[in-house]
Image (tube, grey):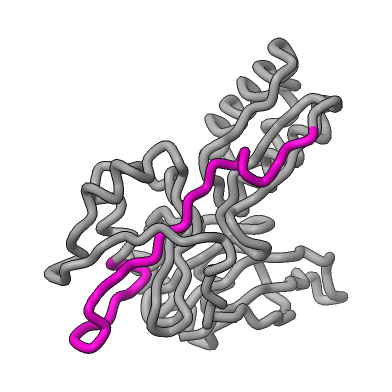
Amino acid sequence: MNANIYQHFRSDEHSFIDLVGDWLEQVSFQYAPYLTEFLDPRQAYILETLVRQETDLKFRFFGGYGTAERVRCMIYPEYYEPEQEEFEIVLFEINYPKKFTTLSHGKILGTLIGSGMKREMFGDIISDGENWQVFVAKEVASYLQMQVNKIGSVTVRLDLKNYTEILTPKDGWSQEKTTVSSLRLDTVIATIFNISRQRSKQLIESGKIKINWIETQRPDFMLDLLDIVSIRGFGRLQIQGIEGKTKKEKIRLALGVLRK
């Protein structure tokens, strides 16, 4: 891996860059495809950058449906043409007593991770407002089906579904444009959700913010392209484009925003 590549990314991303380097080397040497676990959008962006800059290999992303946020990636030599089944993704619907209770993304994710699986084994968790489905790596599907029979105090069952039965997710991102004085986490949150910098800082320091599904308590964290920020009680945002600067040196951003 070209040593200069590190300077384009955050220091906490260097270990992921090394991992991608190992995958690319493996595909080049063995001349056979490699399938990753589920990646978040920022990791997918890093992987795509490295494949394009460092190799002649090809790659394709798939997360179970067209607009999936979390995807697996197939890295492969030029001669190869991957099929959809090779992405090894299974779709479960969560069967639960809808009359008596409601589920949430957080509760479902907490239960899945509590079953002993790492986050990289799960793709998107989607809902049409009442029903819930989750995309899972095939290699852990049967284990999960046996393990998960409760979410909180609610008895549930994971039912296998076909791709033709995918729900239409209710939550749609709205596309927004704005300008910010800096890509600092507290500044971006304050601007997008129209709250004070102080309030934004408090939310971060009290553990209510996740970046790419990992909690952070650093108000000065510098956001970058395709980062997804979840703000408990407010919603989510994704940096979809960094589009230069205004005359007053403010940064122009294109965003996806999901308001609670």
Residue 41 seen: yes
Which percent across, then down, holds residue 87? 60, 42
Which image quarter holds the N terminus?
A: top right
Give x and y (percent) for residue 202.
35, 73
| Residue 96: quadrant of the picture | bottom left
How many marks do you count on the picture?
0
Does 181 sit left or right of 18 as displayed? Answer: right
- Confirm whether the magenta stretch covers residue 2: no
Which residue is at 79% across, 35% downward?
Answer: 81
Q: Viewer-proximal residue, 91 or 42?
A: 91
Report which quarter residue 140 is drawn in.
Answer: top left
Check the image and report above or below for 232 versus 48. Answer: below
Q: Is residue 57 left or right of residue 105?
A: right
Residue 238 placement, left or right of 58: left
Percent from the top left, x then y, of residue 238?
61, 67
Given the current orientation, which residue lies at the most extreme left position? 153
Q: Quadrant of residue 254?
A: bottom right
For the point 45% across and 64% down, the residue is: 125
Above or below for 6 versus 142: above
Question: Is residue 206 in view from this perspective?
Answer: no
Is residue 100 depicted above or below 31 in this figure? Answer: below
Q: Residue at x 61, y 54 (%)?
A: 41
Is 101 placed above or below 19 here? below
Q: Residue at x 75, y 21 (%)?
A: 2
- Asked whether 73 or 255 is in front, the reply is 73
Q: Which residues are magenta?
A: 81-107
Q: Residue furthest top?
A: 29
Q: Is residue 84 magenta?
A: yes
